[in-house]
Amino acid sequence: KNQVEQSPQSLIILEGKNCTLQCNYTVSPFSNLRWYKQDTGRGPVSLTIMTFSENTKSNGRYTATLDADTKQSSLHITASQLSDSASYICVVRAPRSYQLTFGKGTKLSVIP
Amino acid sequence: SAVISQKPSRDICQRGTSLTIQCQVDSQVTMMFWYRQQPGQSLTLIATANQGSEATYESGFVIDKFPISRPNLTFSTLTVSNMSPEDSSIYLCSVEALIRTDTQYFGPGTRLTVL
C-alpha cells in the first residue's frame, strides 16, 4: 500500500527562525511530489512540485528537496512569518493517474 | 489556475438529516473529485464526479451514503445522507484543468459538524 509519512506531527517556532519539515514516501514510481499549505478552514494550496528527476525547487521562502533514492523529501521554510502558521501536506502522485497519496501533514505554529 | 467555490462553507446538522454541498469552478475542467478530511487525518478520496454518468467511488464509500451529481463541466454536488457524528469532517472539492497539468486545485472546503 502506498504511504506518505510526515514528521514532525506538529512544530512551534519563533518568528524569523527557519524550520525543516520531512516527508517519507513509498509510492514508486511516481509522477510528481508536491508540498501543499493548508490554512485553517481553507483548502490546500500548492507550494512546490517536483518530478522524479528534480532535486530541489524553491518558491520564495519555501525550498523543497527530493531524494528519490531514499524516497525522502523536505520542505525548508526560511525566516518564518506569522502567516506561515498552517498545516503543510506532502502529496505524491502516481504515474499516468489522478491518484494522489496524502500525508497527514505537519502543523506549524509560528509565534511572535 | 482554477478558482473553486464551495457552498456552504460550514454547517451544523442534526443526526439523521442530509446536506448537499455545491462545488462551482470558474472554468471548464475534465476531472472533479470529492475528498473528506477527518480531524487530524489526511485527505481521503471519496469519489470522482463524472459528467453525465454515475460517480466512481473509492473503497469504503457508497452512492447511497454520498450521492454525487455532475451535470456539466463546471459544477458538482455531494450529498452526505443520513448523517451521524462520524460524518463530521471537512469536505473538499478538487479539479484538474481541461488541459492536463498534473495539478489538482482544491476548493476552500465545507466544514460539517453533526450533532
Image (cartoon, grey):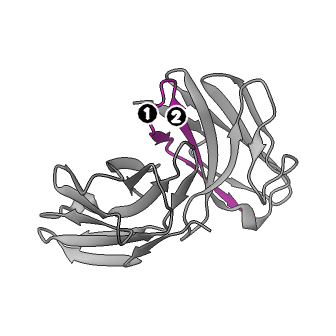
How packed mark 1 is, by other alpha carbons closer than 10 Å (few <14, some 14-19, many 20 or more), is few
Residue A89: numbered disc: none
Q: Answer yes or no: do the residues labelled 1 and 2 have beta carbons within 8 Å? A: yes
The part of the image, by quadrant, that contains residue B84 is bottom right
**Residue B3 place in picture, x, y as percent:** 45, 31
| Numbered disc 1: secondary structure | loop
**Residue A3 place in picture, x, y as percent:** 54, 68
Residue at which label 1 appears: B101
| Numbered disc 2: secondary structure | strand
Residue B96: numbered disc: 2
**Residue B28 place in picture, x, y as percent:** 54, 20
How packed mark 2 is, by other alpha carbons closer than 10 Å (few <14, some 14-19, many 20 or more), is many
The part of the image, by quadrant, that contains residue B14 is bottom right
Q: Which of marks 1 and 2 is nearer the N terminus?
A: 2
Q: What whole-number distance in Å separates the C-alpha atoms at marks 1 and 2?
A: 7 Å
Q: Report whether A29 appears left or right of A62.
A: right
For residue A100, above or below residue A86: above
**Residue B59 place in picture, x, y as percent:** 77, 58
